[in-house]
Image (spheres, rainbow, N blue to C red):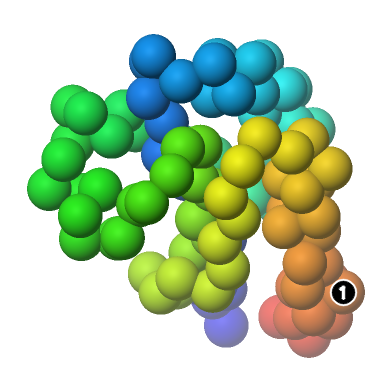
Amino acid sequence: MERRNTRQIIDAFATWCPPCVSIAPKYEAIAGEFEGQVAFGKFDVEQAEDISQEVGISCMPTFIVFKNGAEVDRMEGASEQGIRDICNKNKWADRILDWLLR
């Protein structure tokens, strides 16, 4: 059985946004901590206006969690603990699935 339920966390940011700039190094550090468990990405809302509109970005930064291509969670604002919390959501369910698929 192949596991296909990888979680992705996407940071929608703007270069002129002070909270976006301040959370960026923390986001990168958290990405390192969760390497192999969660895929991390980011995009500049001004460089990708079409994507920003499609996913409904209304403030920056916004962190969107996708699982199997569908949005499952969203957090607005620059909170290091908030990013950690959304990374840890469903962690036990993922571990149980890993165990079942081995």
- Quarter assignment of residue 33: top right
**Relative height, residue 87 to residue 25 (above, below):** below
Residue lying at 37% horizontally and 51% vertically, measured from the top left: 58
Count of picture labels: 1
- Residue 77 in percent (x, y) is at 61, 42
- Residue 40 in percent (x, y) is at 54, 40
Q: Is residue 17 left or right of residue 76?
A: left
Residue lying at 72% horizontally and 45% vertically, measured from the top left: 83
- Residue 87 in percent (x, y) is at 73, 53
- Quarter assignment of residue 2: bottom right
In this view, which residue lies farthest toward the left? 50
**Disc 1 designates what residue?**
92
**Relative height, residue 22 to residue 64 (above, below):** above
Closer to us: 31 or 95:
31
Q: Which corner quadrant holds the C terminus?
A: bottom right
Label 1: which secondary element: helix
Which kind of residue does numbered mark 1 sit on? Trp
**Relative height, residue 81 to residue 5 (above, below):** above
Closer to us: 24 or 36:
24
- Residue 55 in percent (x, y) is at 30, 60
Instruction: Let me know if residue 36 appears in the view.
Output: no
Badge 1: residue crowd in 10 Å (few <14, some 14–19, many ≥20): few
Q: Is residue 94 left or right of residue 14?
A: right
Q: Is residue 32 left or right of residue 77?
A: right
Instruction: Let me know if residue 55 appears in the view.
Output: yes
Q: Which corner quadrant holds the N terminus?
A: bottom right
Residue lying at 51% horizontally and 37% vertically, measured from the top left: 61
Residue lying at 38% horizontally and 69% vertically, measured from the top left: 69
